[in-house]
Every structure is written in structure tokens, then in C-alpha cells.
Image: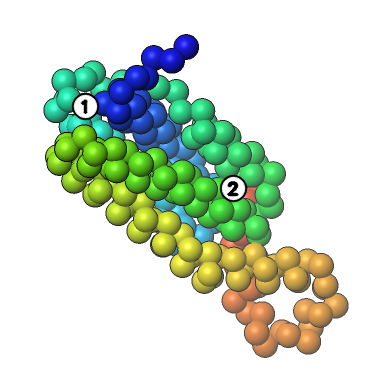
Amino acid sequence: MANIGTLDELFVDELRDLYDAEKQLTKALPKMAKAASSEELRAAFEEHLEQTEGQVQRLEQIFEALGQKATGKKCAAMAGLVKEGEELADDAQAAVRDAGLIAAAQKVEHYEIAGYGSARTHAQLLGNDEAVQLLEETLEEEKETDQKLTELAESSVNEEAAGETRQTQRPAARASQSAGSKTRGAATAKAHKSSGTRHA
Ligand SMILES: [Fe+2]
């Protein structure tokens, strides 16, 4: 059943997919923030939630200019990405949960970057300058978020996960690195504490 026959129709279809994807994210991000142990990661998710609400509004502005009703079309891809993220948050132990949450969030960002990139290109082809500008703004935010997540992954969060994994696997090695393990120990205590409150 082929009911998308023109680039205009394809463009609206893409907007509906993105609209639904963003709406799903406004529900998922608070849960991801809650599941995060690292303050920085939690703050990044909360900041992106605010951005996402603005991104929803940009899409509504585009729909309005096109004389189209702002409605979403179930984005199966985002539903799958969110589901995987939730499963991971449930399955991963506190020590590696943040690292997994970052990975899940980056998959979401890359999906959105692809979606907004294509929609922006199609808006250009259609000569819809206002849409190009609005989609470009969101695209830049998604790229910045992805970059920030990469920085978090490369810094403290994954270092803590790797350190704790090493400690768990090789308890005998702990004594010999006691000098450097102060921060890791604190992180472990924090992770255990927050894991306890989460399940309480
Ligand atoms: Fe977004």
C-alpha cells in the first residue's frame, strides 16, 4: 500500500515519525535520569529533556506552517531503542548501569541525527527555508548531546565502571593499588547506596 507518492508527503511522514519519537523521549528521559547514578549524567538527561520539549515545539511550528495537524506516527525504531534502554537499566548492576545508559542514549541520538538530517535535506529540496532552519537547530542540539555523552563516556562514568569491574573480578589486586583506589571506593559506595534506594 504505497500512499507516499511525493517528496512533500515523504517530508510530512518524516516529521510525524520525528514527532512521535520526541514524544516517546519526553517520557523515557525522566526514567533514564532516575536510573543514572552519576550526577553529571543525570544532569545531562535532564537538560536534554528540556531541549526535547523545545524540539517538539519546533516540529509543531513546521506542521502549522504546512497547514498540517501536528500528529505523530508511531516510531517503531524509537520504541525499540527505548525498550532496549529500559531493559538494560533493569539488568545492569549499578557499577556499569551508567555506562550502559550512555550507550543507549547515544543510539537514540544517532537515530535522531539521521532522521533530522534527512528531513532537513528534504526541506531544502522543497524550498521550505523555515523548516530547514528549525530542523537545523534541532540537529545541532542532537549532535551536541551526542558529543556530551561521548565526553561523559570517556571520562568518569566508564572509568568508574571499568575500575569497579576490575575490582570485582580481581579482589586480590585491590590491596596493591590501595593508593589509587580511594575515588573508586567512594564511587562504589555511592553506587551501592543509590542502588539500594532505587529498589526500596
Ligand atoms: Fe530530539
Give residue 70's position: percent from left, percent from top.
26, 22
Tell me the tag on residue 98: none
Q: Is residue 86 above or below residue 172?
A: above
- The secondary element bearing badge 2 is classed as helix
Q: Residues within 10 Å of mark 2 (few under 14, many from 20)?
A: few
Q: What count of labels does the image hold?
A: 2
Q: Residues within 10 Å of mark 1 (few under 14, many from 20)?
A: some
- The secondary element bearing badge 1 is classed as helix
Residue at image point 17% right, 36% down:
128
Mark 1 or mark 2, which is nearer the start of the sequence?
Answer: 1
Give residue 66's position: percent from left, percent from top.
17, 25
What residue is disc 2 on? 197
Tell me the tag on residue 63: 1
Q: Is residue 148 above or below residue 55?
A: below
Residue at image point 64% right, 39% down:
87
Q: Is residue 157 above or below residue 52?
A: below
- State which quarter of the image contains the C terminus: top right
Left or right: residue 1 versus residue 16 is right
Give residue 140's position: percent from left, percent from top.
30, 54
Left or right: residue 149 versus residue 118 is right
Q: Amino acid type of disc 2?
A: Thr
Q: Amino acid type of disc 1?
A: Phe
Residue at image point 51% right, 33% down:
77
Q: Residue furthest top?
A: 1
Can residue 30 be seen at all in this image of the molecule? no
Give residue 24's position: percent from left, percent from top.
43, 32
Q: Nearer the viewer, mark 2 or mark 1?
A: 1
Of the pair 5 and 136, the residue shown nearer to us: 5
Residue at image point 35% right, 58% down:
144
